[in-house]
Image (spheres, helix red, strand yellow):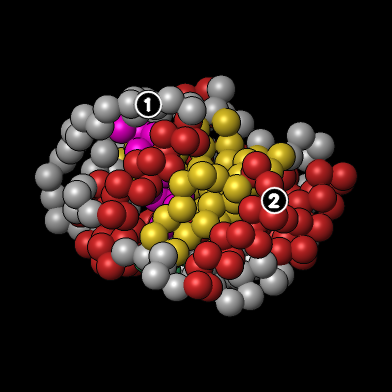
Amino acid sequence: MAKIISVCNQKGGVGKTTTAINLASFIALAGRNVLVVDCDPQANATSGLGIDKKQVKESIYNALIDNKDISQLLVNTKLTNLYLVPSNVHLTGVEVELVSIEGREFRLKNALENIRPAFDYIILDAPPSLGLLTINALTASNSALIPLQCEYYALEGLSQLLSTINLVRQNLNPHLEIEGILLTMADFRTKLTDEVIKEARNFFQHKVYRTVIPRSIKLGEAPGFGMPIILYDKNSHGARSYYEFAKEFLGVDFPIDIEIKEKKEPADGEKSIRQRA
Ligand SMILES: Nc1ncnc2c1ncn2[C@@H]1O[C@H](COP(=O)(O)OP(=O)(O)OP(=O)(O)O)[C@@H](O)[C@H]1O
Ligand SMILES: [Mg+2]
């Protein structure tokens, strides 16, 4: 039965999608079955995994609103064991549409029920807001993984996120835990990075992962090529740091044995849509 994890922070551009894609990729390379669900209308996880969002006809929207069986929405990625439920532009209006739907906070949780046994991990890439999409993600999850950018005001707004998590725990999902805090985009030459790391560790103590993700040009480039970092440049600092993070996350060491299922150019989402048996 899959453990379901929301990667969330209402602050934009802190590394949620990069973390969702790359953590999922390394867990898949560790031999686990992993599903990424793109819960963001921006569809960055979708394009970052090589699926052209403009070609996506049916997305998580159809599961949330039309009760479409989510197993019909699964898409293959370039990595064995790694699957995606894509997002597309239809998700843009979903928060408004959900308002009048019964059990609106539980739509994603219910949609995932069927496919949960087929996976070891389901990673939900949340949008940069605390609206109904993020609430749906948190309600469906065992835990929340919070990326924190090593930047000015990194911790600002976190109390709002933590109180949202508390509210969800009290009212919708009593088992919701904080999986951990991941420091991202660190520039170790600067004092600021040191300060943010110190402050985060002071505040969250052992909940902050030992692994810190550095700022890496390659990590910024990879999504433009529709590839997780392991396929884009496996020797980059970015690849190594997410590999370290995945090992820390799983609590096991594992060798990387890269298997590319299909060699193909990015942006051919249509062709890669398959139904999972
Ligand atoms: N460690 C890193 N080093 C360099 N660039 C990075 C790193 N992590 C992420 N980026 C880049 O920074 C931008 C924001 O990252 P990402 O999309 O992962 O953040 P996000 O929190 O998902 O953003 P949003 O809130 O818009 O969904 C992207 O262009 C991404 O490629
Ligand atoms: Mg994102």
Tell me where residue 88 appears, x and y as whole percent: 44, 63
The CA distance from mark 1 to mark 2 is 25 Å
Q: Does the magenta stretch include residue 12?
A: no
Ligand 1 rendered quadrant? bottom left
Q: Which amino acid does label 1 sit on?
A: Asp
Task: Residue under label 1, please give it.
Answer: 253
Magenta span main SS:
helix
Extent of the magenta region: 18-29
- Position of residue 39 relative to residue 210, above or below, is below
**Which residue is at 25% across, 46% downward?**
230
User: Does label 1 or label 2 sit earlier along the sequence?
Assistant: 2
| Front residue of 117 and 27 | 27
Q: Is residue 24 magenta?
A: yes
Element marked by disc 1: loop
**Which residue is at 46% across, 53% downward?**
212
Asked if residue 250 shows in the view, the reply is yes
Q: Residues within 10 Å of mark 2 (few under 14, many from 20)?
A: few
Task: Residue under label 2, please give it.
Answer: 204
Quarter location, residue 91: bottom right
| Front residue of 182 and 15 | 182
Disc marking residue 197: none
Which corner quadrant holds the C terminus?
Answer: top left
Tell me where residue 256 appears, x and y as whole percent: 25, 32
Beta carbon at label 2 within 8 Å of ligand 1: no
Q: What residue type is labelled 2?
A: Phe
Total count of labels: 2
Relative to 79, 106 lies left or right:
right
Tell me where residue 208 appears, x and y as whole percent: 60, 48
Q: Which residue appears farthest toward the left when viewing the image?
A: 263
